[in-house]
Amino acid sequence: MTSPSTQEADTDSTSPLPTENLGASQAGSSVYGGRPTFGLIRHDGANGGTLTLYELLPSEQADARRERLERGSPTRGLVVEDFEDVFDESVPNDDDRWSWEDWTAVKIASLSGSRLRSILSLVRETLHGAGLDDGTVTSSGYAEVFLPEAVGVRLALGFVGVKPIQRVDRMRAFCRGIARMSYEECYYWHAKCRSPSSPNGEKALRTLLTDHI
């Protein structure tokens, strides 16, 4: 699979592209001193489990991104919550070297039912490949896992892309396509999907990965 040049990437995606072999020691984005920049939460309800993916951002950066999106398209707002309200003052990876004051949790998507079942293989493969325990968020009950940037970027593509799909075979094909992408391709499409200047990025990615079905 070949992607266009990454020069079109969103201007706030300043992180360098990671290598293909992402080790567990790569805690997150070098831009933020190695801290995790995504968080995944699982909780069970009356209708089964739900997985919700968040991107972790400083408040100022989240506000700036929201303003850019709203200027480009008033309907493309962000759901921004305080970090402590979402993660109950949890400390990622039991490491207290980072302060989470003035950080936010930007909701990417929540998946349940057939969409959750379709994306579980992508979640397992992506977390396992990064040396992270996937069992806590793919089994049952409440669980949180904090993710390196490259892992979060790949999962973000899966979450935003699969949510509008109605057919299960298309959901599974989409997730398989995301799993096969290189990290460079993931970063390109992640920037394209969230860019105010590219409102059809998500649709283009779904077409690329499922149009053959």
Image: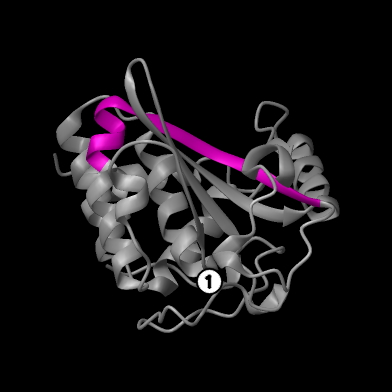
Residue farthest along the top direction in this orientation: 46
The answer to whether residue 211 shows anywhere in this view is: no
Quarter that holds the C terminus:
top left
User: Quadrant of residue 162 in the image?
Assistant: top left
Question: For the residue carrying disc 1, how many other residues have a C-alpha within 10 Å: few (<14), some (14-19), or many (20+)?
Answer: some
Left or right of 146? Residue 77 is: right
Asked whether 6 or 94 is in front, the reply is 94
Left or right of 139? Residue 203 is: right
Asked whether 76 or 47 is in front, the reply is 47
Residue that badge 1 annotates: 6
- Asked if the stretch drawn in magenta spans residue 115, the answer is yes
Quarter that holds the N terminus:
bottom left
The answer to whether residue 97 shows anywhere in this view is: yes
User: Quadrant of residue 47 in the image?
Assistant: top left
Q: Amino acid at mark 1?
A: Thr
Task: Look at 34% across and 62% down and name the residue there.
Answer: 133
Left or right of 135? Residue 24 is: right
- Asked if the stretch drawn in magenta spans residue 202, the answer is no
Q: Assign a secondary structure to mark 1.
A: helix
On the image, the x and y values in percent for residue 67 come to: 81, 41
Identify whether 70 is placed above or below 119. Answer: above
Give the magenta-colored segment's residue range.
Answer: 103-118
Identify whether 96 is placed above or below 75. Answer: below
On the image, the x and y values in percent for residue 125 come to: 26, 61
